[in-house]
Amino acid sequence: CSITVSLASEPAISANCNVTVVSDSQKVTRLYNKVTGEHLYTTDQAEVASLSSQRDWNNEGVKWNSPESGEPVYRLYSLITHNHLYTSDNNEVASLLNSKSWTIDNNAKPVFYSGGDKNIYRLYNEGLKMHLLTTDQAEYNALPAHGWTQEGAKFKCY
């Protein structure tokens, strides 16, 4: 943000600021299932409340803010591993759905949108057969020592 103040004969103030307003519906909450080890990400506060009331799920709070529109991120569910995958890649969605071992979750609507200037990294753990999303660069760098494979920055957020 830059603010310019002119002290010429006519005082003038001009401001050039980019302000991002984030509504509650844009807050992406991460929940953790202590039985399965899975993390679930959602902007749906009813889903947060429902899962948080179940003893196996812990609400880990808002992890990032996503825009109201942009690149859609879909949540798929594995009928085999009972875990979720988050992707904006339509080819990945089609391929997994064609395999018949995955279903589209969230009524086939995006669970959040990708956009902004902050990276969301995706990791995969072959032993656990699950993915993890994080905006924390230190977490992303540390997890390979614990069996996680880095898949890179897959999405963006605020």
Image: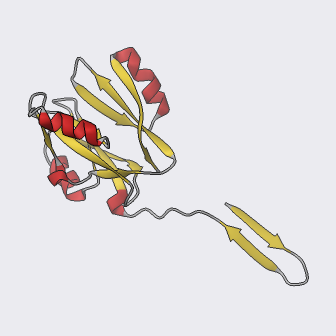
Q: How many marks?
A: 0
Please say if 22 is above or below 51: below
Q: Residue at x 24, y 56 (%)?
A: 44
Q: Is residue 63 left or right of residue 78?
A: right
Please say if 39 is above or below 81: below
**Image position, residue 100 (x, y; %):** 8, 34
**Image position, residue 92 (x, y; %):** 26, 36
Q: Residue furthest bottom?
A: 10
Q: Residue at x 22, y 33 (%)?
A: 38
Q: Residue at x 47, y 64 (%)?
A: 21
Q: Is residue 57 among what the camera can see? A: no
**Image position, residue 143 (x, y; %):** 39, 22
Q: Is residue 13 among what the camera can see? A: yes
Q: Residue at x 34, y 21 (%)?
A: 148
- Quadrant into which the N terminus falls: bottom right
Q: Residue furthest right?
A: 9
**Image position, residue 37 (x, y; %):** 22, 29
Which of the pair 94/128 is nearer the observer?
94
In this picture the colour scheme is secondary structure
